[in-house]
Image: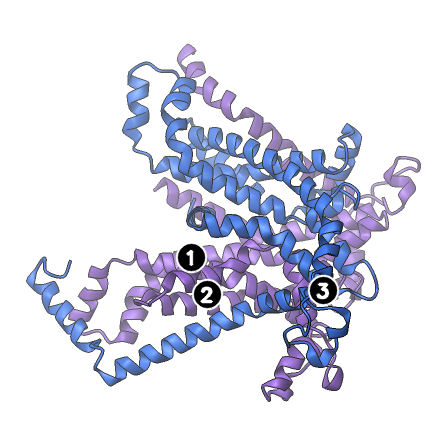
């Protein structure tokens, strides 16, 4: 890359010269940079350390003076208690997020296709109106939503939450798919048009097969946000039929004397699914972040 | 005429389910909510139709905006937003700036800085409630204990247990969770600046500081704007963290979203709806200019 032309050669040479490892100024700034990066790494990991050590501590180890020490005896009681308390809610969360993510991904894909590659007059305005739904504070619809859900007679808990996550997931999934389809060469879709393929056939046989990466991004995004949701959970479900965020909050704040050991084991259990997704599919996770925010 | 129908029909067919759902569940409900906020629906009997409901205009808004309690919530929201925004932007930018130059193990740093984003506010609230324990001295736990251990005793404080500034303590876990996200945005921004542009500036004799001021910062402006919008609108909706760290009934850390929840719990639907409208207006002031800007630049 640096040998393409003389002018860049000169520039690269100067750059390299200035940043030569032997240059003491450069060596110092590099050391400082690594020190700072490591410092922040430790700071970011402090809560993880606390979660882990506290989750293995027994009552005898709970004294304030030993707050930051490793457990004297490593016990599993907290993990057992957290698992017994949270397991049913973890199951309900799974039942909720899987259909919610798949349905909203399908809707987002159809919308994104129409709004980017099979445009009609006013498509930009429709898109902006849909996008606004992503930013509204749900507090602004909550009271009539409660009355509506009650009026329709939707069963409280998982069924209601699936419907809500699908509906309020439409804006973000539409945005991600639209941005993706904008990057698909227009010729691909135009070729379909010229061949006389209808829109539905173009969508089904040309666009859908190349949408797999976007589906992964959207599914991860929806999975994570529905799994982590607490607002809809607290308004539309109860301890008996609610997702894991609600159950965890009840475990942590339910009694006056908080059992930190069990709460922290519970926090780790409740975070495990999204953490696994993050570790295994991190690349797509970041892809979702990017397309979910930058430009429209 | 047939051509128009063929042009409009299928696209509308494909997106009509979403359009109807968004129309009803976003715009329709916003309208109903606005109406409810202008009634006297303050009791359980009224919410179920067992007692009559009357239109009262803007009375609920004057009551809310005139009350010390709600003013306290608005002040808290402003304070929280400033600290949360400043914290995520500063750390996000700093981390991205450090990682932009070649670093061994860059992927590890990046992944660890970013991971808190995948955790729910409720789960992080569990550990941050412990870290932000307000006890000091012998009884100190959490961060206050850590400060003692490293000889920074003077940093010990009551965290969220302060009526004036307690809310800023709640911004700390929020920054922990989202600074990595802002870092990821800025890092993509740094990587998007063509190397030729930097080299051209260097050839022209620009100092490192001039390089940043004249080349890098202008290129990062759109990213910074998106980050402010995303973090800003998240901040205005803060709810989960407060529910899990300091509990809703706590006056110190009250914000409008908490008021909305408390009014609803007391079956005061009218006041609850009014808080919702106020939040919507605040968010709209931030978002609508941005959406218009995005729509315009998209057409260009």
User: Between marks 3 and 1, how big is the CA–CA gap?
Assistant: 36 Å
Q: Colour of chain A?
A: blue
User: Between marks 2 and 3, how big is the CA–CA gap?
Assistant: 32 Å
Which chain contains the residue that carries disc 1?
B
Element under disc 2: helix
Decide: is B247 above or below A218: below
Q: Position of residue A119 (x, y in %)?
A: 40, 28
In contact (CB < 8 Å): disc 3 and disc 1: no
* Residue B185: mark: 1
Quadrant where the N terminus of chain B is found in the figure = top left
* Residue B92: mark: 2
In contact (CB < 8 Å): disc 1 and disc 2: yes
Element under disc 1: helix
Q: Which chain is purple?
A: B
Q: Position of residue A96 (x, y in %)?
A: 65, 38
Q: Position of residue B53 (x, y in %)?
A: 87, 39
């Amino acid at each position: 890359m640096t040998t393409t032309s003389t002018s860049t050669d000169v520039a690269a040479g100067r750059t390299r010269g200035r940043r030569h490892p032997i240059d003491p100024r450069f060596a110092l700034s590099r050391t400082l940079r690594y020190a700072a990066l490591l410092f922040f790494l430790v700071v970011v990991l402090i809560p993880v350390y606390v979660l882990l050590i506290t989750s293995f501590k027994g009552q005898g180890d709970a004294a304030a003076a030993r707050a930051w020490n490793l457990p004297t005896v490593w016990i599993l009681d907290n993990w057992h208690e957290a698992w017994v308390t949270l397991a049913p809610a973890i199951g309900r969360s799974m039942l909720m997020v899987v259909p919610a993510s798949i349905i909203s991904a399908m809707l987002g894909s159809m919308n994104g296709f129409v709004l980017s590659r099979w445009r009609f007059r006013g498509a930009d305005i429709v898109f902006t109106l849909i996008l606004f739904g992503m930013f509204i504070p749900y507090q602004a619809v909550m009271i009539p939503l409660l009355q509506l859900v009650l009026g329709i007679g939707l069963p409280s808990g998982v069924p209601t939450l699936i419907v809500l996550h699908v509906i309020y997931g439409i804006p973000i999934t539409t945005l991600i798919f639209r941005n993706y389809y904008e990057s698909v060469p227009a010729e691909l879709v135009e070729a379909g048009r010229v061949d006389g393929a209808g829109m539905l056939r173009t969508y089904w046989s040309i666009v859908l097969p190349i949408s797999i990466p976007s589906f992964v991004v959207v599914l991860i995004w929806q999975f994570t946000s529905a799994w982590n949701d607490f607002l809809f959970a607290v308004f539309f479900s109860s301890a008996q039929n609610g997702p894991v965020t609600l159950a965890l909050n009840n475990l942590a704040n339910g009694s006056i004397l908080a059992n930190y050991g069990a709460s922290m084991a519970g926090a780790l259990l409740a975070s495990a699914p999204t953490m696994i997704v993050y570790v295994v599919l991190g690349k797509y996770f970041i892809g979702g972040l990017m397309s979910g925010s930058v430009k429209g | 005429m047939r051509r128009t129908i063929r042009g409009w029909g299928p696209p509308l067919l494909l997106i009509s389910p979403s359009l109807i759902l968004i129309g009803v569940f976003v715009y329709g409900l916003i309208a109903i909510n606005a109406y409810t906020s202008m009634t006297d629906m303050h009791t359980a009997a009224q919410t179920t139709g067992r007692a009559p409901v009357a239109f009262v205009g803007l009375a609920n808004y004057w009551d809310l905006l005139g009350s010390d309690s709600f003013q306290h919530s608005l002040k808290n929201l402003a304070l929280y937003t400033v600290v949360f925004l400043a914290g995520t932007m500063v750390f996000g930018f700093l981390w991205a700036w450090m990682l932009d130059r070649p670093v061994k193990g860059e992927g590890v740093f990046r992944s660890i800085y970013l991971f808190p984003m995948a955790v729910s506010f409720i789960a992080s609230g569990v550990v941050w409630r412990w870290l932000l324990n307000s006890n000091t001295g012998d009884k100190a736990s959490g961060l206050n204990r850590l400060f003692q251990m490293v000889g920074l005793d003077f940093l010990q404080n009551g965290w969220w247990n302060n009526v004036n500034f307690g809310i800023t303590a709640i911004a700390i876990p929020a920054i922990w969770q989202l600074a990595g996200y802002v870092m990821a945005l800025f890092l993509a921004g740094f990587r998007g600046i063509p190397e030729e542009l930097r080299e051209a500036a260097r050839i022209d004799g620009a100092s490192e500081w001039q390089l940043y001021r004249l080349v890098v910062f202008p290129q990062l402006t759109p990213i910074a704007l998106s980050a402010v919008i995303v973090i800003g609108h998240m901040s205005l909706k803060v709810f989960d963290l407060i529910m899990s760290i300091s509990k809703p009934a706590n006056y110190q850390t009250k914000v409008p979203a908490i008021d909305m929840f408390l009014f609803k719990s007391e079956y005061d639907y009218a006041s609850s709806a009014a808080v919702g409208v106020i939040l919507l207006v605040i968010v709209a002031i931030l978002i609508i200019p941005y959406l218009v800007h995005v729509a315009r630049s998209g057409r260009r």
